[in-house]
Image (cartoon, helix red, strand yellow):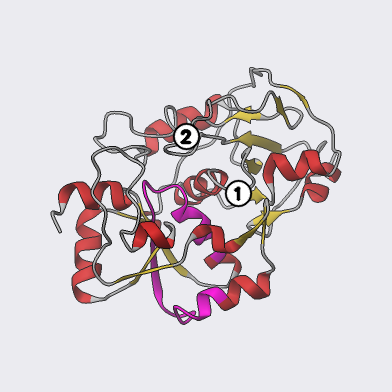
Amino acid sequence: MAHLVITAPVVSVQWLDSNLNAENLIILDASIKKVGSEETDSKSEVQIPKALFFDLKERFSDVSAPFPTTFPSKEQFTKEAQNLGVNKSSAIVVYDDKGIYSSARAWWLFKAMGHTNVAVLDGGLPEWTKAGLKTELKKEYKPIKGDFISNYKPNLMMYFEDIKKASSFNTHIIIDARSEARFKSLEPEPRIGLRSGTIPNSTNLPFEDLLEGNKLISKEKIVAKFESLANTEDSLIFSCGSGITACVLALGAEISGYKTISVYDGSWTEWGSLVDK
């Protein structure tokens, strides 16, 4: 059985299918429901064989924090990753049931905790099933506890005070992944009671602009999207509603060769709550 080393931030369903038996492979299902949607959390009844549920909302978030999907402590992340059987040597592929939505957040969390042998499955479960590849009814596996240890990389995550400085002094290019209508306050935020608006001096690249159907658009098209907003040597901060789809932009930026990339953890939910205008 092969010992996988993942060298790209995204892998195809065909690649994953051909490597399913690798001894160090761990497949994680990071599906969540979209904010404001009517769907249930268990929309899909099937999963990729041997997939483990990566619980973004509870086990891999600081649930004591005032805002949703808050970055967990390295101790919490270590514990929960070990409980999923993650080892220091694990090759991790993350997917979700939307295509590419919340899987990128799980990918970014692993990177922020120092694990680089990780990738997002391009097209996720929809692309896997579309290709006619084998699925199984959802089940809960009990893996052997892993030896993963978090090695937090603080430059990959940004917080409220960081964004205040970046916004005021233009030290970074802040790119918002929300839809154009939300960015321009033409439609309300999906979270009840959250005001509309934008972080001052931020620009907009809706995360869905990087997608065509379930999958990412071509690398060339992704590069063109980013080159219209920033040079490759620029420092980028990605924001969204609550730190989920900002990670889709982080994924696109990494594909495009940007080296200084970070995600604003609280995103608009925090900024819009703490700043009046």
Q: Residues within 10 Å of mark 2 (few under 14, many from 20)?
A: many
Q: Position of residue 15 (x, y in %)?
A: 81, 50
- Tag count: 2
Tell me the number on the disc at residue 32.
none
Magenta residue check for 244: yes
Magenta residue check for 100: no
Question: Upstream in the sequence, badge 1 or badge 2?
Answer: 2
Q: Position of residue 271 (x, y in %)?
A: 23, 52
Is residue 71 or residue 41 the one in the foreground? Answer: 41
Q: Position of residue 241 (x, y in %)?
A: 37, 49
Is residue 82 or residue 195 the one in the foreground? Answer: 195
Amino acid at the residue labelled 1: Ile
Amino acid at the residue labelled 2: Leu
Q: Report whether 239 appears left or right of 148.
A: left
In the image as oriented, which residue stretches furthest toward the left? 276
The residue segment tinted magenta is 225-252
Q: Can you identify the residue that label 1 sits on?
A: 100
Mark 1–mark 2 Cα distance, whole angstroms, equals 14 Å
Q: Can you identify the residue that label 2 sits on?
A: 56
Quarter holding residue 220: bottom right
